[in-house]
Image: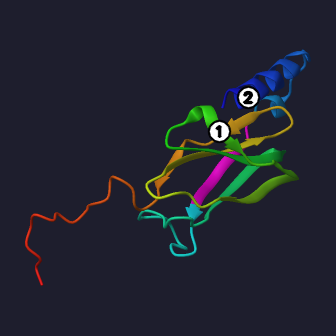
Amino acid sequence: MKKLLFAAAAVWLLAACNKELGPEYETPPVFDEVTFTTATQPDKITEPVKVDEVVWVNATVSCPYKVKQVWLAYFVDGDESNVVTTTPFNYDATTVTFRERIPGQKAGAKVSFQVLTRSDYVFMWTQTYTYKVEGGEDEEKPNPDLPDEN
């Protein structure tokens, strides 16, 4: 995430070199909708994701001064020192639909992600979204001390 913030600072500094700034320097791209789904939960993730199941992130981004790039950054189990960023998709349009995958993860993993975008002069990102992968220590395990209900 530090690399991404550094990139945003660099864009701001470059924009500061021009004293006659128009609205394109201040108008950020807007995320109209962000969804994340899987093959077994195609509408919306409401339950833990299956082990090794791919999660698809979809985002609609718009900017009157054109969206130039959109990409995804994610990390697993709160480890922000190991952020994975996808290769940015290049665009040159006022509204774009972005789709990228997060690979399947191990049982019990907690995955957090953000979608990032930039116009020529403004860098933006979404809130952090999180989902869990089924299994792991949080799941209820049968108590061997209780009698079987069958």
From the viewer's perspective, tell me whether residue 16 is left or right of residue 55.
right
* Magenta highlight: main SS: strand
User: Viewer-proximal residue, 116 or 94?
Assistant: 116
From the viewer's perspective, tell me whether residue 20 is left or right of residue 95.
right
Q: Secondary structure at mark 1?
A: loop
- What residue do we see at 76% from left, 28% from top? 8
From the viewer's perspective, tell me whether residue 113 is left or right of residue 9.
left
The answer to which image quadrant residue 100 occupies is: bottom right
Q: Which segment did they paint magenta?
A: 28-35
Please check the rendered image and state whether residue 34 is part of the magenta-colored stretch, yes or no.
yes
x and y percent of residue 59 in the render?
67, 56
x and y percent of residue 34 in the render?
60, 55
User: Viewer-proximal residue, 129 or 136?
Assistant: 136
Amino acid carrying label 1: it is Val
- From the image, tell me which residue sits under label 2: 3
x and y percent of residue 3 in the render?
73, 28
Please check the rendered image and state whether residue 49 is part of the magenta-colored stretch, yes or no.
no
- From the image, tell me which residue sits under label 1: 83
x and y percent of residue 13 in the render?
83, 18
Distance between mark 1 and mark 2 Cα atoms: 10 Å
